[in-house]
Image (cartoon, rainbow, N blue to C red):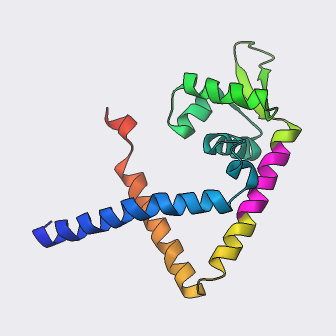
């Protein structure tokens, strides 16, 4: 990469570093009400989404997906238990195996969040042309693939 390329990437980085937090704050402000009120955190939503898809997960599965330690997941799940969003289920064959499953309240919460997120996205992206939405999705796919190729910090240590 030449000097011009480095300058262009540096300029790109600076604008992204400034814009991304602003964008995230706007999405949080206008996003799902439970998230905006601070009743539930992004990791909680992620966990509920996983449980919504898979039915139940063990702590190490959740830790792997969130790229955090199992003990950190335990703290998140403990808070979710207190909020009545999840329950722990012991394995029938091996009592040491503990799975986490969404309660009815947890399922209702994630479904409401998904619905509110969809509504907000529809409102926002309806203001952007179909061609720009397609370009946006194309770029997001490329970014996702680039991130997959680079691996993660955890693997490099």
Q: What's the residue at 72%, 56% (across, down)?
A: 32
**Exactly how many numbered labels are in the figure?**
0
Image quadrant where one finds the N terminus: bottom left
Specify whether 126 is left or right of 11.
Answer: right
Q: In this view of the protein, which residue sits in the foreground, 31 or 136? A: 31
The image quarter containing residue 59 is: top right
- Is residue 137 depicted above or below 109 in this figure? below
Q: What's the residue at 76%, 61% (across, down)?
A: 116
Q: Which residue, as the protein is rendered here, is positioned at the far right? A: 104
- Is residue 111 depicted above or below 60 in this figure? below
**Residue 103 inside the magenta-drawn segment:** no
Q: In this view of the protein, which residue sits in the foreground, 51 or 93? A: 51
**Residue 111 inside the magenta-drawn segment:** yes
Region rendered in magenta: 107-117
Specify whether 63 is left or right of 121.
Answer: left
- Is residue 21 depicted above or below 65 in this figure? below
The image quarter containing residue 85 is: top right
Q: In this view of the protein, which residue sits in the foreground, 97 or 36? A: 36
Residue 155 placement (x, y as % from top left): 37, 36
Is any part of residue 2 visible from this angle? no
Q: What's the residue at 62%, 45% (across, down)?
A: 42
**Magenta stretch, overall SS:** helix
Specify whether 93 is left or right of 143.
Answer: right
Specify whether 53 is left or right of 135.
Answer: right
Q: Which residue, as the protein is rendered here, is positioned at the far top? A: 95
Residue 87 placement (x, y as % from top left): 80, 28
The image quarter containing residue 39 is: top right
Residue 62 placement (x, y as % from top left): 61, 34
Is any part of residue 95 visible from this angle? yes
């Amino acid at each position: 990469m030449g000097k011009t390329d480095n300058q262009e990437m540096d300029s790109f980085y600076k604008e992204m570093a400034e814009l991304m937090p602003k964008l995230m704050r706007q999405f949080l402000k206008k996003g799902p009400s439970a998230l905006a009120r601070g009743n539930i955190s992004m990791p909680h939503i992620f966990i509920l989404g996983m449980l919504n898809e898979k039915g139940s997960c063990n702590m190490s599965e959740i830790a792997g997906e969130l790229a955090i330690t199992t003990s950190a997941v335990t703290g998140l799940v403990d808070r979710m238990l207190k909020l009545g969003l999840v329950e722990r289920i012991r394995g029938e064959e091996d009592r040491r195996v503990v799975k986490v499953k969404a309660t009815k309240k947890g399922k209702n919460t994630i479904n409401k969040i998904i619905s509110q997120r969809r509504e907000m996205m529809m409102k926002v992206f309806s203001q952007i042309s179909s061609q720009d939405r397609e370009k946006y999705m194309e770029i997001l796919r490329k970014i996702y693939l680039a991130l997959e190729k680079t691996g993660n910090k955890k693997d490099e240590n």
